[in-house]
Image (tube, helix red, strand yellow):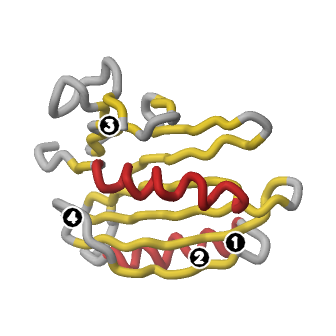
């Protein structure tokens, strides 16, 4: 893991995307401000981790938000294969879950997404790894390590 350059955050070396605090990025990955991180490999579509935020409009359950996201996925992608959601743990989150999605949007190449959803109050954080299925085993360890280092700023 390497520190991230020149981004304000909780510490001098931490980057931010909204309430997401990124203290370090995996070796070989590049920081993209206001987006997340990306790994480029020659001859392969880049893998990326997109960090975003949303807000619960009603209720206080992550499950309802994820069900709505699954509905959108089923309308957006042809024959998506969806696994989950499965409950997970994340420091500072009241609820956390992981969902996996496989689909074929580009030239019939299989794309794989691993999505982590977190809830704190009405705030929803989403961290999404998007990669080619053929690259998944190469980039998943980096993503898992990144998720272990990632934090939520509770003070925002």
Q: In terms of image quadrants, where is residue 58? A: bottom left
Q: Nearer the viewer, mark 3 or mark 2?
A: 3
Q: Residue at x 24, y 26 (%)?
A: 13
Label 3 secondary element: strand
- Labels 1 & 2 near each other (Cβ < 8 A): yes
Q: Which residue is mark 4?
A: 93
- Give left or right: position of 62 versus 69: left
Q: Which residue is mark 2?
A: 71
Label 1 secondary element: helix
Earlier residue among tags 1 and 3: 3
Tell me where residue 132 appears, x and y as whole percent. Answer: 70, 55
Tell me where residue 9 appears, x and y as whole percent. Answer: 21, 30
Q: Residues within 10 Å of mark 4 (few under 14, many from 20)?
A: some
Q: Nearer the viewer, mark 3 or mark 4?
A: 3
Q: Residues within 10 Å of mark 3 (few under 14, many from 20)?
A: some
- Give left or right: position of 84 versus 13: right
Label disc, if present, on residue 96 of the rendered structure: none
State the residue in front, 75 or 29: 29
Q: Which residue is mark 3?
A: 24
Q: Which residue is mark 1?
A: 75
């Amino acid at each position: 893991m390497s520190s991230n350059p020149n981004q304000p955050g909780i510490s001098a070396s931490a980057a931010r995307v909204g309430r997401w605090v990124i203290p370090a990025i995996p070796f070989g990955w590049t920081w993209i401000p206001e987006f997340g991180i990306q790994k480029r490999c020659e001859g392969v579509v880049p893998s990326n981790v997109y960090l975003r935020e949303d807000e619960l409009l009603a209720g206080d359950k992550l499950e309802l938000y994820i069900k709505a996201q699954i509905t959108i996925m089923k309308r957006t992608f042809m024959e998506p294969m969806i696994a989950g959601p499965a409950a997970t743990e994340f420091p500072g989150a009241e609820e956390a879950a992981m969902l996996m999605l496989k689909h074929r949007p580009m030239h019939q190449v299989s794309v794989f997404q691993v999505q982590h959803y977190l809830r704190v109050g009405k705030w929803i954080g989403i961290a999404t790894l998007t990669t080619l299925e053929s690259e998944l085993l190469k980039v998943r360890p980096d993503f898992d390590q990144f998720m272990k280092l990632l934090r939520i700023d509770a003070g925002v």
